[in-house]
Image: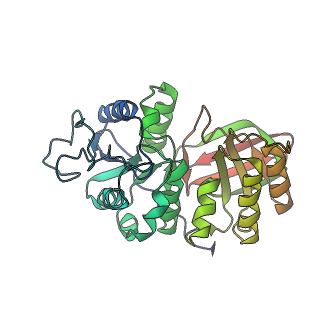
Amino acid sequence: MLASSPPPILPPALRPGDTVAVIAPSSPFEHVLARVGIGWLAQRYRVLFDAGEGPPFDDDDGRRGGPPSLSAPSHHGLFARAGYLAGSDARRSDELARALSHPDVRAIFAARGGYGANRFVHRLDWSVLAARPRWIVGFSDVTALHVEAARAGVASLHGVHVTALGRGDARARAALIRALEEPLGERRFDGLTTLRAGVAEGPLFGGNLALLHACAAAGRLRVPEGCILLLEDVTERPYRIDRMLATLDVGGHLAPAAAVVLGDFEQCAPGTDGITVDEVLRDRLLPLGIPVVAGLPIGHGHRNEPAILGGHARVLAHGPDAAVTLAGA
């Protein structure tokens, strides 16, 4: 649980023409948005994905360079569906394992989050990521992959999914490219809300609260000592946020944090008791005695800024307004 380790390895910056993979480790997704997102990526990178028409990520099947293969959905490939999962555990596990071990892949983009990654990610050999670091890109359920990458000592990118890229948001697309191709660049977010004043800096760690809670229950969560803990969530009642934070605290998982930065808590409406999520976050986090800042535009809201998990973060909260600076190193 408590970890004192060397700084995470930062994967090499992406360059135009690099090979990237698109995977579906969690839930099924809207096919048109994914195809548009893949097509947009293919304008800049060589995109590999399992089209369900032969060996996934095969170098000779026409899916490297140029327009990606956009075959009809298949129960074998990226567009597979098995209820609320994007295919069987075996399919999704094999797809991720191939992307992690492929010698040319420089980044792995998730098509969507949802649910399902916790069912198999613990069984993969994550030492291959440490041996050949590459970017893992996603958020929400992909937090499970970020947790495993952190255990392997490799930084990853908390950012939008391929389906979001398919919506054509120029700002989101540009921010993602900038984060991947200039990972050492520094970005400062001003005008945030101070919940508890203070100054702290350390490696950024975290993601979706429900997934961090699930990873803790599975025995996979290792919170780095002195980290800046990023938390966000969606469609959780305030009492459930309370439960997750309380049990993470009791389990000692919040103790290593030097500060907490809160992203969006979308659609976390009060129940009949009237208690709001903001009240819960203050009640659970302020007693930790560390700086707490809210309002970082990260998560399931309209704006989901990319953030390098394992990168350097700085929190400045002297008055009612706070600032957070994020960088790759």
Q: Residue at image x 53%, y 43%?
A: 185
- Split into 4 quadrants, where in the image is the N terminus? bottom right
Count of picture labels: 0
Q: Nearer the viewer, residue 223 or 180?
A: 223
x then y, percent, for residue 164 = 47, 34
Q: Nearer the viewer, residue 307 or 328?
A: 307
Q: Is residue 206 in view?
A: no
- Split into 4 quadrants, where in the image is the C terminus? bottom right
x then y, percent, for residue 66 = 21, 34
Q: Is residue 214 in view?
A: yes
Does 27 sit above or below residue 37? below
Q: Quadrant of residue 278?
A: top right
Question: Relative to residue 188, is residue 306 drawn left or right?
Answer: left
Question: Relative to residue 128, is residue 191 drawn left or right?
Answer: right
x then y, percent, for residue 313 = 64, 52
x then y, percent, for residue 202 = 66, 59
Does 169 sit above or below residue 133? above
Q: How is the image coloured?
A: rainbow
Q: Residue at image x 64%, y 61%?
A: 213
Q: Residue at image x 77%, y 63%?
A: 246
Farthest residue to the left: give it.
60
Does 101 sit above or below residue 300? below
